[in-house]
Image (spheres, grey):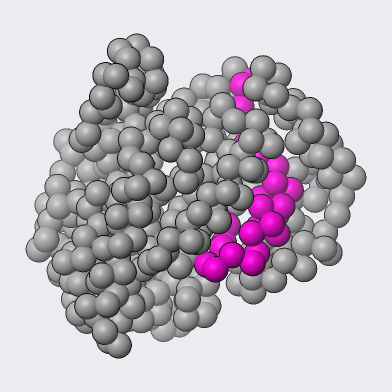
């Protein structure tokens, strides 16, 4: 894993310090998991460049993210769900896929059109998922329409993407970019790569798309993090609007999924939250960003996890379900007028937070 250069991040400052704290926090976890069972699997619906499709989402248990073992991102608790020892065999990975297929057969009417695979790390990192398993998984889902696989940008190359597109599967690589602003990604999220690496991955996807001709499409789905720690509400909103605009301008990136930060256990965000130093974003902020970026040249969606709870994105408690519903409507229809129909007295509080919250007094409200 790339080590931050000393001239940028002095010992004891910046990334080194974040990693040290995160390692200490993560070491408190005690859970361990069965390598033959996926972390989670569920059925849903998703907006894709080809319209709304039924989806099967799989969180594979692959031994977890290497960056997380170095310390990792300030908001990410996923490593707490990965297996001990750090690697999962081909047979165990295929057992996990079997469990997912059984879940789908029991709970869905017919096979899902879209398959999404996340790994709490990088599906395209061969130390997590070897080439044999990657190809076997591509074969398993060859009869579906579309695949999404999660990866850090370093591992997204045209040959690996071609393992899927050669079956005629439209293929998206989901990249946890978090923000287009390098300073925020490095210092607030503690993620090591640069926007330029994301642009390189988009170019790889564009090349895979060209190589696949008319048989299949390949592209990038950028995942952004709304309100990492240390940003005020208004800074977070401004950062998201510019990030969505910058991602949509990159050739090869067709979808942006903007996800509000929630407070996960065994993270720095959790420590800050516990000490009254962090509030997840307002749902009004999420709606505002979606409204402001509705005309960019990409699909923009958001799926606020844990909405309405203290540890998730929330408003006043009265209007959370309504705003969440409008956000989900927007995801499927991309029509900003859905937000005109929701209002609440707490909008005034939110506007005041945007105006008055500063780094030294945040969070201004709970
Ligand atoms: S957010 Fe991704 S890169 Fe960061 S620690 Fe979690 S799994 Fe690893
Ligand atoms: Zn309200």
Confirm whether residue 88 shows in the render. Answer: no
Q: Quadrant of the N terminus?
A: top left
Instruction: Indicate the position of residue 138 as horizontal and vertical percent values.
Output: 21, 72
| Depth check, front residue: 192 or 168 | 192
- Residue 356, above or below 100: above
Give the image quarter of residue 231.
Answer: top right
316 displayed left or right of 62: right
Q: Residue at x 47, y 76 (%)?
A: 49
Region of the chain picked out in magenta, as a range: 276-303
Identify the residue shown where x is 31% and y is 69%: 206
Instruction: Tell me if residue 328 comes above or below residue 269 in the rendering.
Output: below
Q: Is residue 231 left or right of residue 233?
A: left
Where does residue 346 sit, x and y in percent of width and height?
85, 42
Residue 289 lies in the magenta-colored region:
yes
Image-based side of 229 in relation to 99, left or right: right
Q: Is residue 178 visible?
A: yes
Provide residue 27's location: percent of width, then percent of height: 32, 23
> Which quadrant holds residue 24?
top left
On whether residue 172 falls in the magenta region, the answer is no
- Residue occupying the point 22% across, 78% down: 211
242 and 27: which is toward the camera: 242
């Amino acid at each position: 894993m790339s080590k931050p250069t000393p001239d940028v991040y002095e010992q004891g400052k910046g990334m080194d310090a974040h990693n040290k704290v995160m390692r200490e926090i993560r070491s408190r976890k005690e859970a361990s998991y069965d390598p033959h069972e996926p972390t989670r699997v569920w059925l849903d619906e998703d907006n894709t460049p080809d319209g709304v499709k039924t989806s099967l989402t799989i969180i594979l248990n692959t031994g977890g993210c290497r960056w997380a073992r170095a310390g990792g991102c300030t908001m990410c608790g996923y490593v707490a769900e990965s297996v001990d020892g750090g690697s999962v065999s081909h047979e165990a990975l295929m057992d996990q896929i079997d469990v997912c297929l059984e879940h789908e057969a029991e709970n869905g009417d017919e096979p899902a059109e879209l398959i999404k695979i996340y790994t709490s790390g990088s599906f395209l990192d061969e130390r997590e998922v070897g080439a044999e398993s990657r190809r076997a998984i591509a074969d398993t889902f060859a009869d579906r329409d579309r695949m999404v696989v999660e990866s850090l940008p370093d591992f997204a190359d045209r040959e690996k993407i071609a393992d899927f597109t050669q079956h005629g599967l439209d293929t998206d690589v989901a990249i946890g970019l978090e923000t287009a602003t390098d300073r925020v990604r490095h210092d607030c999220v503690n993620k090591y790569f640069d926007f330029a690496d994301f642009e390189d991955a988009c170019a790889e996807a564009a090349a895979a798309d060209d190589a696949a001709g008319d048989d299949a499409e390949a592209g990038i789905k950028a995942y952004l993090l709304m309100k990492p720690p240390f940003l005020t509400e208004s800074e977070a909103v401004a950062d998201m609007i510019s990030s969505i605009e910058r991602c949509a301008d990159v050739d090869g990136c067709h979808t942006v999924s903007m996800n509000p930060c929630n407070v996960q256990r065994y993270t720095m965000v959790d420590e800050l939250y516990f000490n009254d130093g962090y509030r997840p974003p307002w749902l009004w902020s999420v709606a505002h960003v979606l409204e402001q970026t509705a005309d960019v040249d990409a699909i923009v969606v958001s799926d606020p996890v844990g909405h309405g709870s203290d540890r998730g994105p929330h408003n006043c408690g009265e209007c959370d379900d309504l705003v969440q519903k409008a956000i989900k409507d927007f995801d499927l229809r991309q029509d900003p007028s859905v937000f005109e129909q929701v209002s609440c007295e707490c909008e005034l509080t939110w506007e005041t937070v945007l105006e008055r919250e500063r780094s030294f007094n945040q969070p201004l409200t709970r």
